[in-house]
Image (cartoon, rainbow, N blue to C red):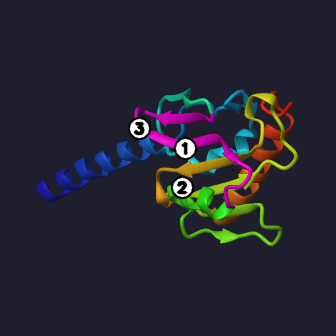
């Protein structure tokens, strides 16, 4: 009888913990003022109750967008202006999740399961003369990494940035 009570109690605890593995929040529909497809962002966000999206501009050449789930950061998406003569390998190694990234065939995308750096082609902005714009994505939880999903999300985010006010 005591064993049955212990097993019942453990079953109740395990049953309760399963309810914590859901996303009880709405996946953001924009990052850095740029629309994103929630279905492309969702795979990189952990289970939780509350999501918060914040935006900062620590320096004029960088806009950082952070998605926090229940407090800690889950995903960061950045817009980074780099001087035209800076080699893309410098941009890639400056982003921790892409240090050892695979390079796409067309040389404008570097990505891993948890990060990506992509050139925003044809983007010009008078506030950033002689600079090129790159998008950068970082995922905090390596268990949520997915190479194919990152490639799709990075492409969609970068395409949305091309159509944004950032590129005038």
Q: Nearer the viewer, residue 33 or 152?
A: 33
- In magenta, the rendered stretch is 61-87
Circle 2 sits in a helix, a strand or a loop, which is it? loop
- The residue tagged 1 is 75
Q: Residue at x 54, y 54 (%)?
A: 95
Disc 3 is placed on an element classified as: loop
> Where's the N terminus, which quadrant?
bottom left
**Closer mark to the observer between disc 2 and disc 1:** 2
Residue at image position (41%, 38%) is 72
Mark 2 and mark 1 residues within 8 Å of each other at the beta carbon: no
Q: CA distance from mark 2 to mark 1?
A: 17 Å
Is 96 left, or right, of 1 in this rendering? right
Identify the disc placed on residue 72.
3
User: If you read the primary sequence from the N terminus, does the residue marked by circle 2 or circle 1 appear first?
Assistant: 1
Q: Which residue is mark 2?
A: 94
Residue 49 position (above or below residue 137): above
Alpha-carbon neighbours of circle 2 within 10 Å: few (<14), some, or many (≥20)?
A: few
Place of residue 25 in the rendered image (x, y in percent of width and height, measured from the top left): 56, 31
Question: Which residue sits at x=68%, y=63%?
Answer: 110
Give the distance between the C-alpha atoms of the residues marked 3 and 1, in whole angstroms.
Answer: 10 Å
Q: Nearer the viewer, residue 132 or 34?
A: 132
Looking at the rendered structure, which numbered label has been put on residue 131? none
Q: Is residue 62 magenta?
A: yes
Mark 3–mark 2 distance (CA, rounded to whole Å): 22 Å
Front residue of this view, candidates 43 and 101:
101
**Residue at 70% across, 70% down:** 103
């Amino acid at each position: 009888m005591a064993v049955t009570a212990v097993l019942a109690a453990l079953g109740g605890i395990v049953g309760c913990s399963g309810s914590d593995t859901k996303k009880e929040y709405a996946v953001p529909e924009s990052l850095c003022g740029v629309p994103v497809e929630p279905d492309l962002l969702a795979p990189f966000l952990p289970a939780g109750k509350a999501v918060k999206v914040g935006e900062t501009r620590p320096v004029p050449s960088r806009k950082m967008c952070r998605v926090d789930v229940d407090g800690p950061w889950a995903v960061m998406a950045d817009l980074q202006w780099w001087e035209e003569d800076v080699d893309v390998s410098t941009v890639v190694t400056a982003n921790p999740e892409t240090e050892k990234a695979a390079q796409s065939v067309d040389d404008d995308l570097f990505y891993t399961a948890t990060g990506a750096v992509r050139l925003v082609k044809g983007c010009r902005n008078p506030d950033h003369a002689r600079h090129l714009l790159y998008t950068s994505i970082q995922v905090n939880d390596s268990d949520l990494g997915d190479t194919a999903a990152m490639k799709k999300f990075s492409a969609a985010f970068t395409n949305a940035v091309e159509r944004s006010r950032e590129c005038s």
